[in-house]
Image (cartoon, helix red, strand yellow):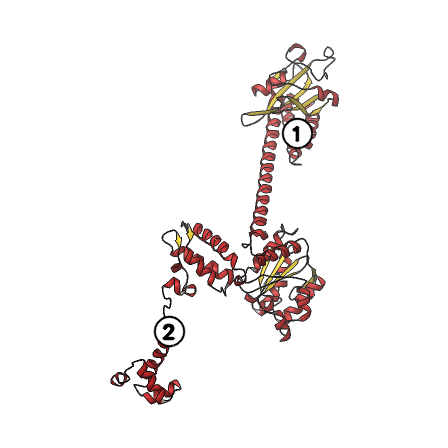
Amino acid sequence: MADSRTAPIKREVKELTLLFEISQTLDRSLDLRSVLQPVLEAMARHMGMMRGTLTLLNRDTGEIFIEAAHGLSEHERRRGIYRPGEGVTGMVIKSGKPVVVPRISKEPMFLNRTGARKELSKEEISFICVPIKLGNEVFGALSADRLFRDEVSCHEDVRLLSIIASMIAQAVRLRQSAMEERQRLMEENTRLQEELQNRFRPSNIIGNSRAMQAVYDLIANVCRSDTTALVTGESGVGKELVAHAIHYNSHRASKPFVKVNCAALPETLIESELFGHEMGAFTGAVRERKGRFELASGGTIFLDEIGDFSPSTQIKLLRVLQEREFERVGGSRTIKTDVRIIAATNRDLNALIQESKFRQDLYYRLNVFSIHVPPLRERKTDIPLLADYFVERYSKLNHKKIQRISTPAIDMLMSYHWPGNVRELENCMERAVLLSEDEVIHGHHLPPTLQTAEATGTTHNGTLQEELDKVERELILDALKSSRGNMAKAARQLGLTERVMGLRVARHQVDYRRFRAAR
């Protein structure tokens, strides 16, 4: 009596133990093939299973093959090839419904293709096979052999195998999702890397002039190494763009690119920004902070406006360049750094050295490979290309359609000396795009600093003498106005004698008396 009451409890405990072990096994690895065999071994221990197989459907070939098995030799496994609808396993995969064969000797559909059940007369074998499904799609089957017993119900085995098959299907789904996510991330990372390399590669620095071709050649040479580079040039020429091109075409492209504007950082903070600080190093240092050199580890640090470094910071930077190590502010632990340094400046470092404002030894450490970016006035053939690029860019940003730049506007762009270089040109074209109302950039859309006499209709039509006479008459009128018509005082103001002043007044037909009447 006691045994009949405790038997179901024991069975439930065994089932829970089996399911827990299978769950742990499936979670052990993302490689499903490596955990299927242990799952079958666990089923054999807890269920009294003689043989067990996990078969999968190959969608490309239409074949059903044994992926993992217990109680079968390698030769027997290789023989177990079926088609959907063929044999019991094929029927389960085709229909998506479980099948129970109480006695395989009585079932003509049981093919015994593996040859593992040879001595069927000595013992009767039951065969249970359940589908493994993802949603409504069947992609495999789980089967088990066990000795036939009248007192043993196969329905319990069907229920347990269906639970295990569902756990396997869920593991497959999770692994598929993980693999798809990993593939998506890999593709996204590859796409971003390609975008970055395409965006910053030298060919995307606008300009085909001979001066820029020389810059491209230098970038191509230095990006293949870890050499420290010094980029020089006037403000607005694109020094940061050159630094980007060097980094993203180097073997460090996947590592950080950290920018530091040395001129924008106060002297009291620049050391902490570069090298970091320990907690309590100074007032306000409430926690440990990594500096830019640590953040750029393995990648590139770009020190813009290097000429603005203080003498004390120059000394610390010199040590980093020489020893590749530093200490945080307030710390004593030496930190090694693997970082490539690219510096840039628009100042004459040689002149600063002569004025004792820049260390000569630091200059030599930075100036290992120098790249000078020419000003825009020295590569005027690049101006139309740059102008077109900026017009297209700001047309998209402002949702405007600009078809072309007029010839007078191009002439104005080519005639200007561009003290602000590419940055000034970019600002001019952005302004012109906003002002244009007829899909064309005209001369009057450009800033007043670019306006020429031809563009504004203020050309001088007279001879040089006629223009000089106009200027002289205006000066005489201004002098008489300020002296209230006093000829002698006006003459002294202009540095003339009274006689010459009288002759010039008569020549230009100026009535000096009207200025007296104005008092």
Is 458 left, or right, of 4 in this rendering? left
Nearer to us in this view, 443 or 370: 443
Task: Name the residue furthest left.
Answer: 517
User: Residue 475, position in %: x, y?
Assistant: 36, 80
The amino acid type, in three-letter code, at marker 1 is Leu
The residue under the point 70% across, 13% down is 124
Secondary structure under the numbered disc 2 in the rendered image? helix
The residues tagged by marks 2 and 1 sit, at their Cα atoms, a distance apart of: 107 Å
Q: Earlier in the sequence, mark 2 or mark 1?
A: 1
Q: Quadrant of residue 316?
A: bottom right
Nearer to us in this view, 140 or 263: 263
Secondary structure under the numbered disc 1 in the rendered image? helix
Instruction: Evaluate if marks 2 and 1 touch, with contact meaning CB atoms under 8 Å apart.
Output: no
Q: Is residue 174 above or below residue 426?
A: above
Q: Residues within 10 Å of mark 2 (few under 14, many from 20)?
A: few
The tag on residue 127 is none
Residue identifier under label 1: 18
Q: Residues within 10 Å of mark 1 (few under 14, many from 20)?
A: many
Q: Does residue 73 show up? A: no
Q: Quadrant of residue 482?
A: bottom left
Residue identifier under label 2: 467
Q: Does residue 182 show up? A: yes
* Quadrant where the image shows the C terminus: bottom left
User: Residue 218, position in %: x, y?
Assistant: 64, 57
